[in-house]
Amino acid sequence: MGMQAAVRLFYPPTCLCCNEVIGSDGLCGACWRDTPFISGSVCDRCGAPALGEEAGVCDDCRTLQPPWGKGRAALTYGENARRMILALKHGDRQDLARPAGRWMARAAEPILTAGMIVAPVPLHWLRLLRRRYNQSALLSRALARSAGLAHAPDLLLRTRHTGTQDGHDRQGRFENMTGALRVRRPAQVEGRHILLVDDVMTTGATLAAAAEACLDAGASDVSVVVLARVDKRP
Ligand SMILES: [Zn+2]
Ligand SMILES: [Zn+2]
């Protein structure tokens, strides 16, 4: 019996969402059905499911004009996505990163280009100390591996502690993030297409600050991909 098999005997795979013992890695049938994977027409900028049949850019992106070019999301943010992201964040289920990276790679497939550099949105070092790892970096590593792209986990740096974005309205979130991120070594991004990775996109303020930092440092293009997109529809 191999090591892997032995481990499985004692720790059989459990559903990534509800922890129920299942036959293989991933989600149990019920969680799979209740997890809204985004498919079909989406906004090309933020990855939100398109309202009509027509693909293109959603009203929010038309109004806000995010600084990145294209974006995709694997899931709509809801109860199951929230549960999985919390488990990933707090370290209960780091094994979530690999399947989540695959889901994100699949969602992002139409916007992937050869030579892209995959980079996570960074945590401030204070928060990193407390949490020990950056969940977005786990996701970006898994995504880069799944898509066969270069990964730069330290591409961006948080220059100041921004606290939590919770409790800020949309404008407050953008103001809170302005200038909070920068590229560590501009030579690394010059003329390159950067794919930014985060766990959740709410207003897009954090990704906007990250994209602006990359463009300021000379990146030719920035695209974004998130595990879950908050559905803005009423
Ligand atoms: Zn389940
Ligand atoms: Zn959009």
Image (cartoon, rainbow, N blue to C red):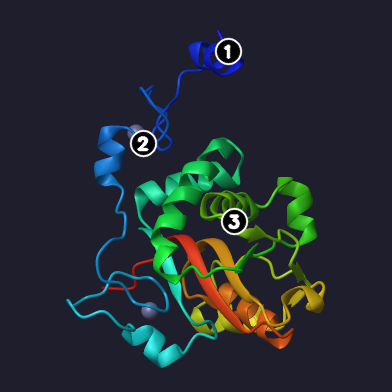
- In depth, the one of 202 and 36 nearer the eye is 36
Closer to the camera in the image, 137 or 60: 137
Q: Residue at horizontal 74%, vertical 67%?
A: 155
Label 3 belongs to which residue? 140
Q: In the image, is 226 to the left or to the right of 29?
A: right
- Sequence-earlier tag: 1 or 2: 1
Q: Is residue 168 above or below residue 134?
A: below
In front: mark 3 or mark 2? 3
Q: Tell me what residue is drawn at x 55 percent, y 36 percent.
A: 95
Kind of residue at badge 3: Ser
Q: Quadrant of the N terminus?
A: top right
Q: Which residue is mark 1?
A: 2
Q: Amino acid at mark 2?
A: Leu
Q: Is residue 221 visible?
A: yes
Circle 1 SS class: loop
Relative side of 169 to 211, left or right: left
> Disc 1 versus disc 2: distance between alpha carbons?
24 Å
Quarter of the image for residue 214 reads bottom right
Give me the disc on residue 27. 2
Image quadrant for the C terminus?
bottom left
- Ligand 1 in which quarter: top left
Separation (CA) of disc 3 from disc 1: 29 Å
- Residue behind label 2 places its C-beta within 8 angstroms of ligand 1: yes
Q: Point out residue 230 in the picture as x, y percentages from the top left corner.
A: 39, 66
Where 9 sits versus 131, above or below?
A: above
Q: Position of residue 198 (x, y in %)?
A: 56, 62
